[in-house]
Amino acid sequence: MSYFERTIVRWVRRALPALFVLQIFALGSGGGLNSAFAAVRNAMPTPLASALGMKSSSTAAADPASDTTPPVISPSIDGVQGLEGWYTSNVTVSWTVTDPDSDVTSTSGCDPSPVTADTAGTEFTCTATSTGGTSENKVTIKRDATVPTEVAVSADRAPDAGGFYNHPFTATWTGSDALSGIASCTVTPYSGPDTSAGEL
C-alpha cells in the first residue's frame, strides 16, 4: 500500500464518526445530499481534498471558468486642475486594472502616460482582457499652462481733468488666450484714496 493510500485510510478511520454526524446534520437541516457533500468536503484536510478533486466552495468561486465579467478599469490623473476641466501643469495618466474572478491576461494602453505640452484634448484609452471578456476606459486631458497674453486695463469713463480722476470710476481688465479662452477678468471700482499715480 502506498503512502498516499495509507494516508487516506488513516484519515477515513479517524474521521468517520465526525463525517457521519455532519452528514446527519446536513440532511436533517434540509440541505440534502449537496449539503452533506459540502460538509464532508469542508471537513477534509485541504491537501487531501485537492488530491481527491474535491474543491472547496471558496476555490470553486475563484475558478476562472466561472468568470463572466471583464476587468474593471479605473483612471488616476495626477496634475493641477484649473477651471472647466483644464489642467494648468504637467499631467500623468495612470490606470488600475482589477478582476477578482480571473487573471488579467492582456492590457493595452494602460501604462502611465505623461502630458507635458498644451493640448485642446488628448484622449487616452486603456483596454484589458480576462476570462470574463474585454473592457476599456477612456479619459481626455486638456492642458493649458500658458498664461493669458495682451492683458490690458481700461476705465469706464474719461479722466475728469488733466488726466486725473476726481470722481469714482471702474477699471476693467481684458486679455487673450487662444487655447482655453479667458475664464474671467477683474473689474475693480475705485473711489480713492487720492494719488498721483497708483496701481489697481
Image (cartoon, rainbow, N blue to C red):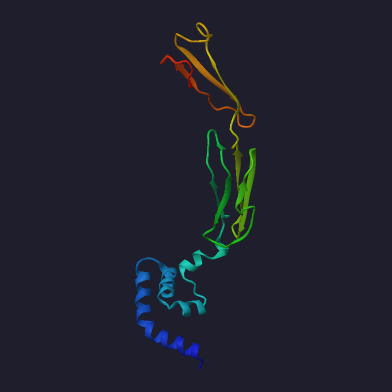
Above or below residue 89? Residue 99 is: below
Q: Where is residue 13 in the image (x, y as percent from the top left)?
A: 39, 87
Q: Which residue is drawn at 52% across and 18% down?
A: 172
Which of 95 and 45 lies nearest the eye of the viewer?
Answer: 95
Q: Is residue 121 left or right of residue 66?
A: right
Q: In this view, does 45 lie to the left or right of 97?
A: left
Q: Which residue is drawn at 61% across and 41% down?
A: 140
* Count of numbered badges drawn on the protein: 0
Above or below residue 20? Residue 9 is: below
Q: Residue at x 60, y 39 (%)?
A: 143
Q: In which quarter of the image is residue 191?
A: top left
Q: Where is residue 66 in the image (x, y as percent from the top left)?
A: 55, 62
Q: Residue at x 47, y 15 (%)?
A: 196
Q: Position of residue 175 (x, y in %)?
A: 59, 24
Which of 11 and 94 lies nearest the eye of the viewer?
Answer: 94
Above or below residue 118? Residue 24 is: below
Q: In which quarter of the image is residue 42?
A: bottom left
Q: Where is residue 101 in the image (x, y as percent from the top left)?
A: 53, 61
Which of 117 and 41 lies nearest the eye of the viewer?
Answer: 117
Q: Residue placed farthest to the top in the image?
A: 161
Q: Residue placed farthest to the bottom in the image?
A: 1
